Image (tube, rainbow, N blue to C red):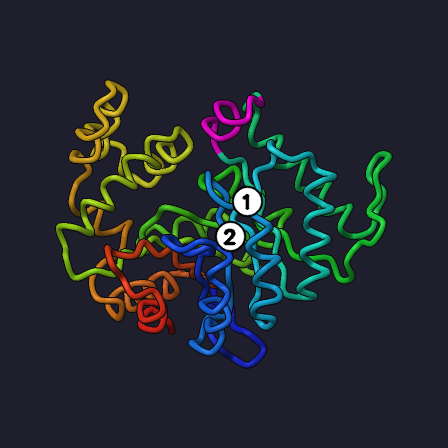
């Protein structure tokens, strides 16, 4: 699968916004600078901070040339009609430059934080995808129709980790969003998507620091927090890391959070959280592109006291 390029031939290169460590209203200058540095995309990440749409609404005005995407909007925490309305609004603010990323999210976010049963995630994702795609195309879905459907409708990509969801992304969406994987894992995921025309977006965690001990400590904490989520645990079982991560899972299940982080093997940390000088991190991101990622999206984890503008400049393509 070839890398995605813009009409001017530039390789797509994205970054996750909001950037950590700075309030969202204070990030205008950073976002405005991204296109001049070579970034083509800005993608939001909805967890426990900003929602998925607001940073992109701001970015649509701060940097009118950036392509904007959600990575991701959970399919449980908003109704499909509301997702369609929000996506239509974002598409109107960034005509031809908005991508809607949908995903199942996780039981913690859906059930524990929002009190919504996390049931049949594949079916829920498929059904919301179909509803939203039809609504954005201007069709009436049941008794709902958008008042101002965007023309053309924005692409929709699915967060996908294992074969069933990856196949759905290749069959019914416009592509897939990958997360928490090594460059060496990309080809297996691309093969499961089974659609040469599908876009492949990957969120790639980057801790641009020459302090290896610090970067690995940060990486271990992140990995223990994420890869113990059932969907990610199953993903890495499928990728072949089940046995090497067994100790981490057992300690986490026993309530030993620090022990779980310490149990993450060094080679797993190095593969999943890129670190080193920013230029070295940039070269490692290019390995994802070579493996089949069309749009790498950097999730920057800045070291203590980092100069964010300088880091973004040095991580740029």
Q: Is residue 30 left or right of residue 53?
A: left
Q: Are marks 2 and 1 in contact (CB under 8 Å)?
A: yes
Asked which secondary structure carries label 1, the reply is loop
Q: Residue at x 78, y 61 (%)?
A: 151
Q: Is residue 236 above or below residue 313?
A: above
Residue 33, how many percent across, how many down? 46, 73
Report the number of discs: 2
Image height of 306 relative to 81, above or below: below
State the CA–CA distance, disc 2 to disc 1. 8 Å
On the image, which quarter does residue 130 sit in? Answer: top right
Closer to viewer: mark 2 or mark 1: 1
**Residue ID for mark 2:** 44
Residue at figure coordinates x 55%, y 44% from the top left: 51
Residue 251 left/right relative to 301: left
> Is residue 37 shown in magenta?
no
Question: On the rendered image, what quadrant is the C terminus found in?
Answer: bottom left
Image height check: is 214 above or below 42? above
Segment tinted magenta in the rendering: 106-116
Spot occupied by residue 82 in the image (x, y as percentages of width and height): 71, 40
Q: Nearer the viewer, residue 314 or 184?
A: 314
SS category of the residue bearing label 2: strand
Please provide percent x and percent y for residue 287.
32, 64
Name the foreground residue: 288 vs 95. Answer: 95
Q: Which residue corresponds to mark 1?
A: 51
Which residue appears at 25% of the width and 20% of the height? 255
């Amino acid at each position: 699968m070839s890398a995605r390029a813009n009409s001017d031939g530039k390789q797509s290169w994205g970054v996750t916004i909001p950037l950590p460590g700075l309030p969202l209203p204070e990030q205008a200058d950073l976002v405005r600078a991204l296109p001049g540095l070579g970034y083509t995309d800005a993608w939001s990440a909805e967890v426990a901070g900003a929602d998925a749409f607001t940073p992109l609404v701001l970015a649509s005005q701060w940097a009118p040339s950036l392509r904007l995407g959600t990575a991701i909007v959970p399919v449980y925490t908003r109704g499909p009609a509301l997702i369609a309305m929000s996506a239509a609004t974002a598409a109107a603010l960034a005509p031809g430059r908005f991508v809607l990323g949908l995903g199942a999210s996780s039981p913690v976010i859906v059930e524990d934080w929002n009190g919504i049963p996390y049931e049949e995630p594949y079916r829920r994702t498929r059904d919301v995808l179909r509803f939203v795609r039809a609504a954005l195309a201007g069709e009436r879905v049941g008794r709902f129709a958008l008042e101002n459907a965007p023309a053309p409708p924005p692409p929709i990509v699915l967060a996908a980790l294992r074969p069933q969801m990856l196949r759905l992304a290749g069959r019914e969406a416009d592509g897939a969003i990958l997360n928490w994987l090594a460059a060496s894992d990309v080809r297996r995921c691309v093969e499961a998507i089974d659609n040469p025309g599908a876009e492949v977006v990957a969120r790639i965690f980057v801790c641009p620091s020459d302090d290896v001990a610090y970067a690995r400590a940060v990486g271990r904490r992140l990995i223990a927090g994420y890869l113990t989520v059932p969907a990610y645990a199953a993903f890495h079982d499928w990728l072949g890391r089940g046995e090497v991560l067994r100790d981490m899972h057992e300690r986490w299940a026993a309530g030993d959070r620090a022990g779980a982080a310490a149990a993450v093997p060094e080679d797993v940390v190095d593969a999943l959280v890129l670190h080193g000088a920013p230029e070295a991190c940039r070269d490692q991101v290019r390995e994802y592109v070579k493996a089949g990622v069309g749009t790498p999206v950097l999730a920057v984890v800045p070291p203590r006291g980092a100069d964010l503008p300088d880091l973004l400049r040095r991580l740029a393509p």
